[in-house]
Amino acid sequence: MISFYPGPSKVEEKISEYVREAQSRGMLSMNHRSPEFIDLSRKTLEHLREKLNVPDSYQILYVSSATESWEIIAQSLIQKNSLHLFNGAFGEKWHQYTQKLCPKAAIASISFLPDQLPDLSAIPQAPEMICITHNETSNGSTLPTPFLNELRAKYPESLIAADATSSLAGVDIEMSLLDLCYASVQKCFGLPAGMGILICSPRAVEHAYQINERDHYNSLPFLLDKIKDYQTTYTPNVLNIFLLMKVMESRPAIFEVEKRLRQRSQLIYKVLEELKQFKALIENPTFRSHSVISVKAKEAIINRIKSKARASGMILGNGYGTWKENTFRIANFPAHRDEEIQKLLHFLKAFDSSIL
Ligand SMILES: *Cc1c(COP(=O)(O)O)cnc(C)c1O
């Protein structure tokens, strides 16, 4: 069975080998304060920095998930106000949690259509934090780099936080345009679920220490203090850290990973244009995600293709949120092989032409 679910998804093919290696090297009962762990953690962070082009001045933290990053950013970095720009379910949830976690702050939002950009003229002044979803997994849309440039140029004083859960490690994200960037590992990293990565710019670090919120086990200043010694505030997912180290060690540079995903996503979008029953949910190519492709059709056809795909050994992702019934989603992640994408496209074409 090949999972094209946009997370959890297909894991890297060598994962079972790596798990055996982890066991034989004693990783499964390793103490998280031991010199062995510190060595593992240091190597993992080095590979992440190198392969994802993270500037030396940025901090990389281990967290438990992307969802936890919503909480960390709200509790430790938003004192006065934040602005959430979203066009789908994940960005909207982040906004909702932030409202609840920051009752004393002014939490504003601008929602926009997935085929458009948010209207920045509506923003009155530089917010303390601007929250964007780099790749909206619920509808397969992405924010293009020129928009990130514009946002950075227009709001040099604001901190910019990006949920890149389904693009980090798949797409080359220009970190210098962002102050916070996070992802869970079950998407483009090709790992089993249960961990996340949170990247912080020097300005984000400075802001965290300025506010100095230390009421929670995952308060950002605690996490930052601990990572100086390559450690975490709680017992981390050591197995997943080991798997992350192995995966990042063997990955090519991110621009090469992105090139491969782009070539394949272009192929997928091209095939979709040829089909009668299906089309890409995102019509404007500028906003089409390379890692998550959302496909629209009539509800009855969506149900049929999902069960037909299963019978052919492929799991398609359900629609999500507003698009639950009339879309399915395809993960085009680095762990997927080119032949697997070909098999899926073959199947789509055959299914489409079988329908009168
Ligand atoms: C998957 C996803 C999340 C949630 O990830 P968890 O690991 O469940 O916390 C958040 N945001 C986006 C954009 C996602 O794709």
Image (cartoon, rainbow, N blue to C red):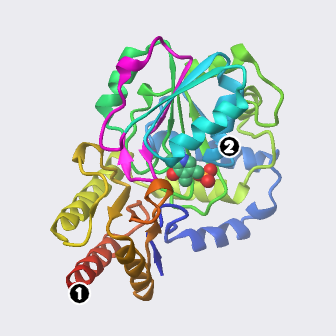
Is residue 43 visible from the viewing direction of this image? no
Query: Residue drawn at (57%, 20%), measured in percent from left and top?
Result: 202
Q: Quadrant of residue 99?
A: top right
Q: Nearer the viewer, mark 2 or mark 1?
A: 1
Task: From the image, tell me which residue sits under label 2.
Answer: 68
Task: From the image, tell me which residue sits under label 1.
Answer: 354
Q: Cβ(mark 2) to ligand 1 < 8 Å?
A: yes
Q: Is residue 341 magenta?
A: no
Q: Quadrant of residue 128?
A: top right
Residue 313, position as x, y percentages in the image: 43, 84
The amino acid marked with disc number 1 is Ser
Is residue 96 visible from the viewing direction of this image? yes
Query: Residue drawn at (69%, 46%), measured in percent from left and top?
Result: 39
**Residue 139 to residue 112: above or below:** below
**Residue 281 to residue 38: above or below:** below
Q: CA–CA distance between discs 2 and 1?
A: 45 Å
Q: Which span is picked out in magenta?
A: 113-142
Q: Mark 2 or mark 1: which comes first in sequence?
A: 2
Q: Quadrant of residue 42?
A: top right
Closer to us: 29 or 152: 152
